[in-house]
């Protein structure tokens, strides 16, 4: 399927596009950037501009000047109005598959946003943040640089994330604190009530991770446990 690119959009050198993408009016995408298939990218979006370093390089990407570790965006994402995604400095800034980035959300340099993440309006991810799969981050939340938000986490609106948030935890406040387990998220990932009970005990450090979890879910927990290795 052909891409549908508005005539006012700017697609710079070093941008690789897959198929079936929609790119809205006055959007600017500069390289090095790779975008997969079936993404809906709205008006006034900025992808691939330099990292927000005061002393960093600021090449004119829309005139073919390329610099940085790049941006990679996967398949089937919805990227709404005025979203900004900055170039990586040390690693590629990444938005994986099936994410929904609402209006005015910001993905800073060297961030990794895994599959199925929702960033609500005006969420701000500081550089080097890792948002794991299936997380849902509420409107106006700010995440400090190098933060990690675990898979399936639910963050209340207006929160300030200053430390890591664990898998399937619900967190809220400034500074944000974990207040509950996201059981709805666990059931949506295939846990029955008994498994959800056992995972809740594990997350509260009162038991071990139960056997027999859905394979994808178990893999995410194992990756989270090994993240500092």
Image (spheres, helix red, strand yellow):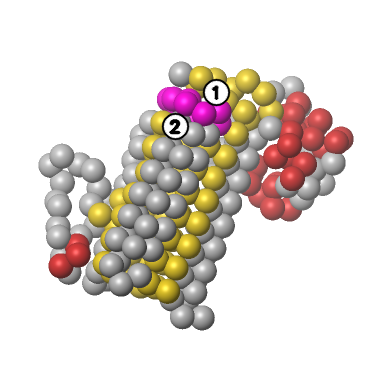
Could you tell me if the residues under marks 1 and 2 are in contact, i.e. CB atoms within 8 Å? no
Label for residue 162?
none
Image location (x, y in percent) of residue 193:
85, 36
Residue visible at 43% across and 45% down in the picture: 103
| Quadrant in the picture for residue 30 | bottom left
| Quadrant in the picture for residue 46 | bottom left
Residue visible at 37% across and 72% down in the picture: 5
Q: Is residue 158 magenta?
A: yes
Residue visible at 69% across and 28% down in the picture: 181
| Res. 211 visible in picture | no
Q: Is residue 3 above or below residue 83?
A: below
Viewer-closest of 31 and 164: 31
Label for residue 140?
2
Secondary structure that dominates the magenta span: loop
Image location (x, y in percent) of residue 14:
27, 71
Label for residue 172?
1
Image location (x, y in percent) of residue 225:
59, 38
Q: Is residue 102 above or below residue 7?
A: above
Q: Secondary structure at mark 1?
A: strand
Q: Is residue 141 above or below residue 34?
A: above
Nearest to viewer (mark 1 / mark 2): 2
Image location (x, y in percent) of residue 72:
40, 61
Which segment is the magenta one?
155-165
Q: Secondary structure at mark 2?
A: loop
Q: Residues within 10 Å of mark 1 (few under 14, many from 20)?
A: many
Image check: 76 left or right of 175?
Answer: right
């Amino acid at each position: 399927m052909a891409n549908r690119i508005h005539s006012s959009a700017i697609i710079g050198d070093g941008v690789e596009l897959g198929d079936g993408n929609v790119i809205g009016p006055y959007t600017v995408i500069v390289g090095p950037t790779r975008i997969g298939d079936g993404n809906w990218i709205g008006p006034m979006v900025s992808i691939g501009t330099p990292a927000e370093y005061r002393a960093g390089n600021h090449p004119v990407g829309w005139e073919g000047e390329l610099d940085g570790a790049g941006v990679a965006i996967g398949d089937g994402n919805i990227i709404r109005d005025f979203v900004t995604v900055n170039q990586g400095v040390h690693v590629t800034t990444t938005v994986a598959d099936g994410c929904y980035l609402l209006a005015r959300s910001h993905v800073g340099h060297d961030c990794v946003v895994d599959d199925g993440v929702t960033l609500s309006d005006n969420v701000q991810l500081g550089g080097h943040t890792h948002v794991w799969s299936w997380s849902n981050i509420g409107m106006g939340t700010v995440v400090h640089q190098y933060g990690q938000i675990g898979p399936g986490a639910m963050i209340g609106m207006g929160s300030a994330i200053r430390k890591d948030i664990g898998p399937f935890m619900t967190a809220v406040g400034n500074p944000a604190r974990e207040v509950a387990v996201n059981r709805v998220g666990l059931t949506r990932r295939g846990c029955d009530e008994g498994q959800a009970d056992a995972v809740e005990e594990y997350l509260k450090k009162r038991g071990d991770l139960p056997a027999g979890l859905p394979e994808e879910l178990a893999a995410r927990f194992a990756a989270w446990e090994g993240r500092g290795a």
